[in-house]
Image (spheres, helix red, strand yellow):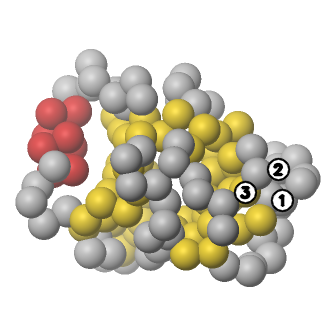
């Protein structure tokens, strides 16, 4: 099995959707892609296709293409840490209709809530799913068809 230590990505995208409870994110890498399905990450074979921008929204406000850590707070929150210290923070919120939605935001070191998000990401109960030292062996391979 191929041991991947560093995650360099080409594109990150999430689908256009009115129902954000089932948030999905695709992280296209060179040989595989990392897929987030609202509750877990899995590795899938490379899509070998360009993402259809009519179905998927490319996350454009990321300038670093290296992921150095992925963390989880037991199905509640997820954190993707980039080499430039920017964090993609995936969280759940209650909307005005009292429906739970899963959302994400990009938090840069100069943002007002960066320190709060970073402290949460480093709490002792947060599980490390990936870091550069251990690789991504804890992320399972899955054979799913992603319609891009």
Classify 10 Å Cα crowding around label 2: few (below 14), some (14-19), many (20 and above).
Answer: many
Q: Where is residue 116 in the image (x, y as percent from the top left)?
A: 14, 41
Say which of marks 3 and 1 sits in front. Answer: 3
Q: Do the residues labelled 1 and 2 touch (CB within 8 Å)?
A: yes
Q: Position of residue 2 (x, y in %)?
A: 66, 60
Picture disc at residue 32:
3
Q: Which residue is drawn at 43% across and 35% down?
A: 82
Residue 47 in view in this figure: yes
Q: Is mark 1 on a helix, strand or loop?
A: loop
Q: Is mark 3 on a helix, strand or loop?
A: strand
Q: In which quarter of the image is residue 132?
A: top left
Which comes sooner in the sequence, label 2 or label 3?
A: 3
Q: Which of 144 and 61 is in front in this view?
A: 144
Q: Which of 5 and 9 is in front in this view?
A: 5
On the picture, is 62 further left or further right than 143?
left
Q: Residue at x 16, y 49 (%)?
A: 122
Q: Where is residue 34 in the image (x, y as percent from the top left)?
A: 61, 59
Q: Nearer the viewer, residue 100 or 105?
A: 105
Picture disc at residue 47:
1
Q: What element carries label 2?
A: loop
CA–CA distance in space, label 3 to label 1: 8 Å
């Amino acid at each position: 099995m191929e041991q991947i230590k560093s995650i360099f990505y080409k594109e990150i995208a999430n689908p256009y959707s009115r129902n954000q409870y089932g948030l999905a994110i695709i992280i296209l890498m060179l040989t595989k892609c990392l897929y987030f399905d609202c509750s877990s990450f899995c590795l899938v074979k490379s899509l070998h296709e360009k993402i259809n921008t009519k179905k998927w929204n490319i996350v454009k406000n990321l300038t670093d293409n290296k992921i150095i850590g992925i963390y989880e707070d037991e199905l509640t929150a997820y954190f993707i840490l980039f080499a430039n210290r920017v964090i993609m923070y995936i969280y759940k919120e209650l909307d005005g209709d009292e429906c739970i939605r899963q959302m994400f935001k990009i938090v840069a070191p100069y943002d007002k809530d960066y320190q709060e998000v970073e402290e949460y990401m480093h709490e002792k109960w947060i599980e490390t799913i990936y870091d550069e030292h251990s690789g991504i062996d804890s992320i399972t391979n899955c054979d799913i068809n992603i319609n891009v």
